Amino acid sequence: MSNSVISVISRFLEEYASSTPNKLKVIDAYLLYIMMTGALQFLYCLLVGTFPFNSFLSGFISCVGSFILAVCLRIQINPQNKGEFLSISPERAFADFLFAHTVLHLVVINFIG
Amino acid sequence: MAHLCLFSLLVLSLVLETQALTPTHHLTTTDVARLQAVLSQPFTDLKSAYYSVVGLSKLGIFVADADETCRFINSNLDPSSVESLFYAAEASQALSGCEIPVSNDTRDLLLATVSEDSTASQIHQSVSALSALGLPLASQEVVSALKARISKEDNVLAIILALQTASRLSQQAELGEILEEIEDLAARLDDLGGVYLQFEEGLEATALFVSAAYSLSDHVDMEPPLKEDQVIQLVNSIFSKKSWDSLSEAFSVASAAASLSNNRFHVPVIVSAQGPAAVSHSHPFLQLQVTDVLCQPLSSASVLVESASAVASKSAILNQAPFTLRDGVFELNFMASQPASGYYQFSVAITGDSRFVANHVELKVKVSTRVAINNMDLSVVDKDQSIGPKTTRVEYPTKAKASFMADSHQNFAMTFQLVDETTGVELTPHQTFVRLHNQKTGQEVVFVAEPDSKNLYKFELDTAERKTEFDSISGTYALYLMVGDATLENPILWNVADVVLKFLDEEAPGTIQAKTLYVPKPEIQHLFREPEKKPPTVVSNAFTALVLSPFLLLLILWFKLGANISNFTLSPSTILFHIGHAAMLGLMYVYWTHLNMFQTLKYLAIIGSLTFLAGNRMLAQKAVKRIAAEQSSRLAKYRSLR
């Protein structure tokens, strides 16, 4: 049983390393960074307490929001999805990404207190 | 149709009833005496002599030494001043047998003052002096002069003086226009709360208006255009002040009182009960004083009770019963109708003269009675009712000989009846209390005895149930019965018996504390909101470093993946875009530290639009390059396939 899980995972990693374009790997690295930052914030909250609750919320929401926007960017940039995003060029996707981030950061900074 | 008429009549009568005013302020005999005293003060000059002499004559009192006063007037007279002549003439007319010498010059001076160029006050003084001295005057000239002055001086006092002057003129003169001024002046009165009606110029003006209006109306024999309610409101205003600041104010009140008590049209009636409006068997007569505003009894009045009904049950007791006049007081033997004790609403009418105003009065009369206690039975009943109750009857005001014992197995019970001493009717007074007083400790517990449906009072003391009120202290308690009510003449405090109560000893408190209700309470310290507990700085710093560490990981990963900035074109739009973007991030930091949302939005709008334009250009260029690269690669692939 565990053998098959390990073989599935190793196969997946191989496929990933070989067939994913470099651009998407860059975005994936960014996603991993965002996720770790969010997880560490959550760990702090669990261990130490929610004292400035608004700050915790704004930091955590910032991570979550950035993750979601980066995932959207990755989906839109992926050449394999070109069929579904005919009207949105990669540049347009990136511009949307930047604009949404501006709004997100505005809200986060407002709430961080 | 008939129903509609009836209904409207009913509504109208109800409305009229609610609007009928009775005077709330009037002069009592002491007030009238005080007014006389003020006016009787020794006078210092001609003006005060005028006020005193003429004021007292209006109240029907004549100065003691008329000759002395006459000499005083003559010696202080200044024949060249119209005002001085006016005071002297009026005062001498009030004194009997006082003559002022009049010369031709004096007469000419007075006649010359009657013209449009003198003030209304001067015209009033000269006309009054002329008529008091018995000199002839031309009424029509006066009327035209007055009319001219009224239109020039529109103030209240001038018009009042014009009215007063017109009442001295001959009845053949055309006084119609001046008569209309009464109505105009009445419209200028201020209605205060529906109770008072007065000029804003004050009490003196209001009082002078009343006396001038009635003297002119009497002179021309035409009813003044004042409604009954207005007359009563004027009475309230004028007679609400019981001590007067100046001689002129006292004089104006005296002349108003004189004109209201003796004119041809409206005579306000003052009805007051002599003493409290209460009757009982010892005082069966309800006595009313019916006077005019000067506290003089009305000779032609006859007083009638239109209806008297009980306040509680609204049943009518009397209908159209007359009062009899005895020694200037109207009395009625109300107890002859054998009313039950309580409060009664009387509606009294005073008739006899069509001039009477406010002659319907509502009175509340109390009928008191004496109470007697019947059938006071005390008993101690066993709770399980194994032993029959022993009932002891006690007669008021004696005390029961034996004391009663009650412990937790027994109840102590008391029943009695309260009746009217004379009629034997059962009563339910407001206060029927049973008080138990421990003589040793000073404790006192009070209970209420309640009547049942047959008006039999019952009181039961369950020792076990009530032990908290007694604090479980056993001992001998003196039992008192307290009966009281507003309509009882003999409230009762009766020590009926002694009751020995036994509670379970272990529950009794060691020492008896007086109930401290009114001592200072413990002080409340305000607790300020405590700041939240913060974690130690070491922990926060450690976690800050931990949270920032994934950034390093990101940089390492990107480096390993080979992410680079080799495609960076140094075109102006690119540079501008990157600067703008960096500026936006910097603005976020500044927002966190310094700015508020509105300022941030303002700056963001500026920087954002620049960044957008630059970025748009940059991305467009990149897109063009990408499409060109794709096309060339496709071309190369196509060529290689061929």
Image (cartoon, rainbow, N blue to C red):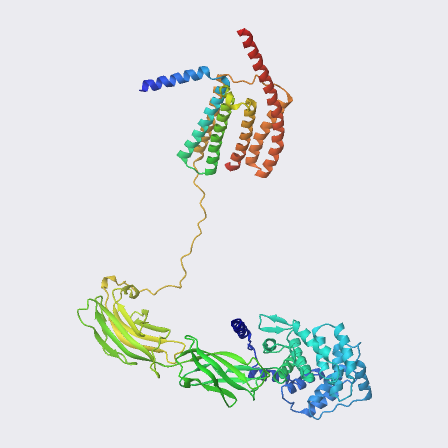
Above or below residue B373? Residue B470 is above
Spot occupied by residue B574 in the image (x, y as percentages of width and height): 61, 22
The residue under the point 71% across, 72% down is B155
As drawn, the residue found furthest toward the left would be: B386
Q: Is residue B542 visible?
A: no
Total of numbered circles in the picture? Answer: 0
Q: Which quadrant holds the C terminus of chain B?
A: top right
Above or below residue A80? Residue B363 is below
Spot occupied by residue B137 in the image (x, y as percentages of width and height): 78, 85
Above or below residue B9? Residue B303 is below
Quadrant in which residue B615 is drawn: top right
Quadrant in which residue A16 is drawn: top left
Q: Is residue B2 visible?
A: yes
As drawn, the residue found furthest toward the front would be: B1
B530 or A45, which is in the foreground?
A45
B441 or B419, which is in the foreground?
B419
As drawn, the residue found furthest toward the bottom would be: B97
Spot occupied by residue B623 in the image (x, y as percentages of width and height): 59, 20
Spot occupied by residue B507 in the image (x, y as percentages of width and height): 25, 62
B514 or B279, which is in the foreground?
B279
Quadrant in which residue B476 is drawn: bottom left
The residue under the point 47% across, 17% down is A20
